[in-house]
Amino acid sequence: MILYSMPSSGNSYKVRLLLALLGRRDVTLKHVEYGDIALLQAKADGHLPFGKAPVLLLDDGTYLPESNAILLYLGDGTEFMPDDRVARAQMLAWMFWEQNQHEGVIAVRAALRTYAHRKSEVTEDRLQALLQRGHELLQIMEDHLAAQDWLVGTAPSLADICLFAYTHSAQDLGGFEMSRFPALGNWLARIKALDGFEAL
């Protein structure tokens, strides 16, 4: 299989992290970073169905886009996919929330502060609004993780891998005040301590 992966992207990182935790070395990485000719070429060649990375090219030639869909494909049958039907639904709820709420605030503020091609979108009001909303979203995770070690059940699941990607860099890249969220900090440390963990 081939993974079209953007090295700086949290969405691509979550897939690489799952592969590392599973000890999978059978997937070839093709880096398609912003500003690189490789990204333009991958789009032109039809390798990115939705126009963005990550995309997993399966052995049968199927292109699978969207980070969380790829996580579900790779995680099926592994320890990161709960056996219990309710727990699986709860895991999916966190993963849907990550894309619908969390990513559009936490990742967007980081992108506005990081990527040169996003500078024209930056205003102080927008950054402040994203900061406030981001702290509200991080508080939701903080409250949940204050009562349990993992987002779902008693072991790490795809939900934890999914939400780790942009949360772990929320302070360094996004400027969020992570010291306000001690339970979240402990959760981040637990993920970093998992066997096979690889950093962004």
Image (cartoon, grey):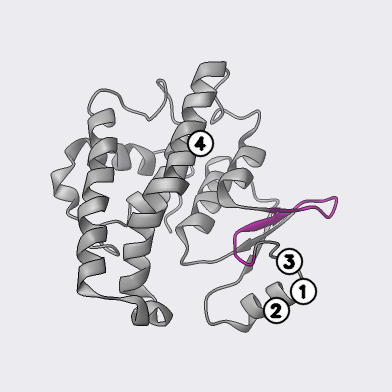
Badges 3 and 1: C-beta atoms under 8 Å apart? yes
Which of the numbered marks, if any, corresponds to residue 158? 4
Q: Which label's residue is closer to the chain start, 2 or 4?
A: 2
Mark 2 sits on what residue? 41
**Which span of residues is magenta-colored?**
51-64
Residue 72: quadrant of the picture: top right
How much space separates mark 3 and mark 2, taking CA atoms?
9 Å
Dot 1: within a 10 Å radius of its alpha carbon, few (fewer than 14), some, or many (20 or more) residues? few
What is the chief secondary structure element of the magenta stretch? loop
Q: Is residue 38 magenta?
A: no
Q: Which label's residue is closer to the chain start, 4 or 1?
A: 1
Mark 3 sits on what residue? 47
Residue at 48%, 30% in the rendered image: 91
Which of the numbered marks, if any, corresponds to residue 77? none
In the rendered image, residue 142, in percent from the top left (x then y), is placed at: 24, 36
How much space separates mark 2 and mark 4, taking CA atoms?
31 Å
